[in-house]
Amino acid sequence: MRLVLVLALIGCQKQEPTADSDGVHEEPTLCDDVGGLALGLSGVRTAGQSDLDEAAGYLDDLGIRHIRIGENWIYREEERGIYTWDGLDMRLQWAEDNGYAALLLIESRGPSWACDPAQTNEASCVFAEDEPFRAYVEAIAERYSDRIPRVQFGNEWAGGYNYVGSVEDYAKFYTMVYDAFEQHSPDTSVSLGGLSAGMSMLLAVCDGLFDSYTTFDDDGNIYEYDADAMSEFCTADDGWPIYLERMQTVFSQVQTDAIDIHLYDDVERWEIYVDNIRAQSWTDDVPVIASEFGGPNLALEDYSDDYHAQQVEKYIRALGRAGVEEAYHHSLDSSYTMWFHEESGLLDDDGEQKPAYEVYQQAASCSVQ
């Protein structure tokens, strides 16, 4: 069960408004807050040429040059030793031809012959042997040498479901990805898969930055926890220390060129989450990216198109103020979203542009390309 947390903040850092020559305070413009942020899109359909043509139309209209593309070993080496590159060739050539910078997410799944059946779920598997995976990622790095700006391995791995194996397994296979690109594609930035929004939230909670939090389950039931309940979870042997150790162990064993944090919904806290991640002794002094961000959350917020647009502007402002280097809105439409984010696409169910689309377009016009 995936939980999304919304946390009540003890104190929040806010950017002070500027003052003009008459002493009148003026709020920063959207472009002021965007600063050095590069905006992109995740969750875009790229299965075939018609999907790519449609995606290019939206990316160009939005003024977006960054796109996150998924890559699954299942489709590259269905039969051991026989690679099929057509699909990935098509996507990456399309990106190059259109001037898009691809963030390639190499998923932590594989063909059935490569996975340990005892350590497999719908989201991931532990590879039964090292060498086939090493050969696969080396083949990617060689074939597309210095043509992929960013690569990451696995997604939301710290929670235990999206990577079913041990953290030692994850660190081992991630290091194979890092080493392959360092050798064959040195201009590619390689990072761990994104930390889920829940991990950043709980890290802040258990570091004492908040005095309560609210969460909900997949049935929409809402649960509120006070300071006592929070303290119990943060110290219990079967609670937060398990997840903290997973993160500390991986970060201590690997090299990474960026830290990826997923940010959803509770935008008033995002700057705190980013600062708190940077402050950890086990994180490297490297750029922070957000390969997924978005909202609003239907379980906790009343939705309207206008409210959605207002929130998207707040998301972008917070990301820029936090010094995030790249940020990818989690979906163009709502095809890839959970039920509580089914209204958070920039397009509605009929493919029409929502007010949030125009906000994103405006922000992209002054973002880093």
Image (cartoon, helix red, strand yellow):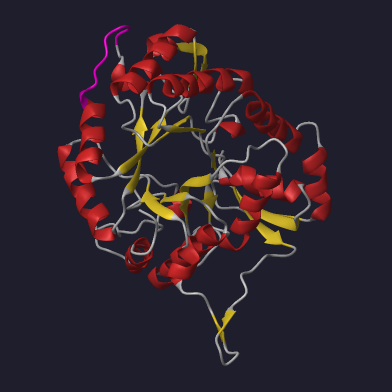
Residue 83 among those drawn in magenta: yes
What percent of the width, then of the height, locates residue 63? 28, 58
Q: Could you tell whether 276 is left or right of 104 in the image? A: right
Q: Could you tell whether 333 is left or right of 175 in the image? A: left
Q: Is residue 179 above or below residue 224?
A: above
What percent of the width, then of the height, locates residue 356? 37, 65
What percent of the width, then of the height, locates residue 180? 43, 19
Pick whichever, 50 or 178, lies toward us: 178
Please identify the dominant SS of the magenta region: loop
Can residue 83 be seen by looking at this rendering? yes
Q: Bounds of the magenta span?
A: 79-86
Q: Could you tell whether 6 is left or right of 336 in the image? A: right
Pick whichever, 108 or 178, lies toward us: 178
Can residue 223 be seen by looking at this rendering? no
Q: Is residue 142 above or below residue 53?
A: above
Q: Residue at x 59, y 78 (%)?
A: 17
What percent of the width, then of the height, locates residue 181? 42, 24
Q: How many marks?
A: 0
